[in-house]
Each structure stands twice: as structure tokens, then as C-alpha cells.
Image (tube, rainbow, N blue to C red):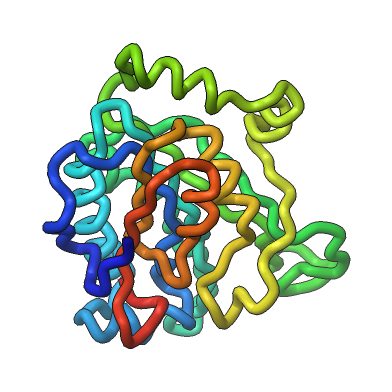
Amino acid sequence: MIYYHSSEEMPELGDESVHCVITSPPYPMIAKWDECFHRQGADSFQNMHSILGTVWNECYRVLVPGGIMCVNIGDATRTKDKEFVCWPNYAYMMVDCMHIGFTPLIPILWKKISNRPNAFLGSGFQPVNAYISQDCEYIAIMRKGRLRQFSDEEKVLRKDSSFTKEERDLWFQQVWEITGKMGAKKDSGWPVEIPYRLMRMFSIKTDIILDPFCGNGNEFLYTQWDRSFVGYEVTDAKINP
């Protein structure tokens, strides 16, 4: 089910009705997201995160106790007032989420780009005015409250949702090397392998998964693995929260 309005309010969802949140929001201070934030009156780093924070607060409300929220977000590099700056989206978002009540867990580092020589910025071979190439984004992982508890029926489903040793050994490493989706500079897509892994890691069969910034959505992916899906998206722009 996809609802076509802002996820800043999700009245269709009751308190503690969702088991897992898997999403990738528009990133503050990234040029391709400027218009979507400007339409909502946000013209600064703090204002942009304030809009996202409203969504994270709603996600906290609808998550079951012990439910997990996974958020793919990258830091932004941008020149402002002739000064090159790395805007710390991950850190700012995590502080917001801790204030809401989420418990932060160890994040995943998604290495989108590999084997990219000569990717430095700035002064080339001379110190000091060069910058590190940006090859990774974060996948923040946080929990609502204490560890999730399972009913007897859910314990059976949990066992039936198990992953293999090979999957566990690969997925629970902190660095994921997955090539970024073609066209991602213009669109909001991310490789389907990422939500697939997160779904398998942090939900069980029959769970409800929420994506408050669903774009094209991954409804088929989730239903194929016996989960239910709820998404939020506006009709006039896929990138608008």
C-alpha cells in the first residue's frame, strides 16, 4: 500500500503498528534535492534536517517496541560562500534520532565506488589543501527501546525467516561493497540488494515494513518474501519527502 502524501504525518498508521523501517531520504545540501526542500520552506542545513526529523518522529511512533529503523544517508560535499564543506548528514540525523528516543546501533558503511584512481580534490600532490574522495555512505541502524520480544507464533516465523551462515557472515560485516545504481545522480534509486539484505536481517515473515520516502518503492521485493509493505510518496516529485 502506498499513500501519496507527505510522511511528516502518517495518520493511516496506528501507534506501534509497523515492525521495520527501511528507507533512503533526500539528503540535505545535495543539489538534486534542493527543490524538494525549498518547496517546504527549508533553505538551510538545519531547516532541512528539521523536516526529516518530523518524519523520524512519526517513524518512532508507529514502530513496535524493539522495531528497527534503517536509513541510508550520505554526507554532502558542497561549496558555500566560496568554502568547500562536508555537511555531516549522518551525525546530525543520529543526534536528532537519539533525542526522539531511538537507540543507535553500529552503522553499515556502504562503499558505492571502488577502484577509482586519481579521485582527489584540491591541490593534487601538494599538502595541505586536498580533500579525501567520498566513496561511502552510511546505513544508520537504530532500535526503538529494548530488544524486540516475540510471541510463540512469531518465534516460529522468526525461525522460518533465518538466513544462512554465508549470508550472516557477509551481511553483518560493517562495510558493504555494492556498486551504486546507474542514474542515481539524477534519481533517488538505490540497489535492490540493500533493502533486500536489511529486510532479511531486521524483519521476520508477516512483518509490516514502512518506507516513508518510497519513490518507486520495493513493494514486490517485500511481498515476495512474505512481508507487508507501506510506503509514502508525493505525486508530483519522487524526491519530495
Q: Is residue 96 visible?
A: yes
Residue 20 quadrant: top left
185 above or below 19?
Answer: below
138 above or below 233?
Answer: above
Can you name the residue that lies furthest to the top here? 152
The one of 18 and 56 positioned closer to us in this rendering: 18
152 above or below 72?
Answer: above
The one of 55 and 1 positioned closer to us in this rendering: 1
Picture residue at 28% right of the left edge, 61% below the top: 52
Side (left or right) of 24 relative to 174: left
Residue 215 placement (x, y as % from top left)? 43, 71
Quadrant including the N terminus: bottom left
Report the number of numbered marks. 0
Picture residue at 66% right of the left edge, 61% below the top: 134
Quadrant including the C terminus: bottom left
Residue 41 placement (x, y as % from top left)? 20, 81
10 above or below 4?
Answer: above
Picture residue at 23% right of the left edge, 73% below the top: 5
The one of 92 and 218 positioned closer to us in this rendering: 218
Residue 159 placement (x, y as % from top left)? 52, 18
Picture residue at 51% right of the left edge, 58% below the top: 220
The one of 81 and 105 positioned closer to us in this rendering: 105
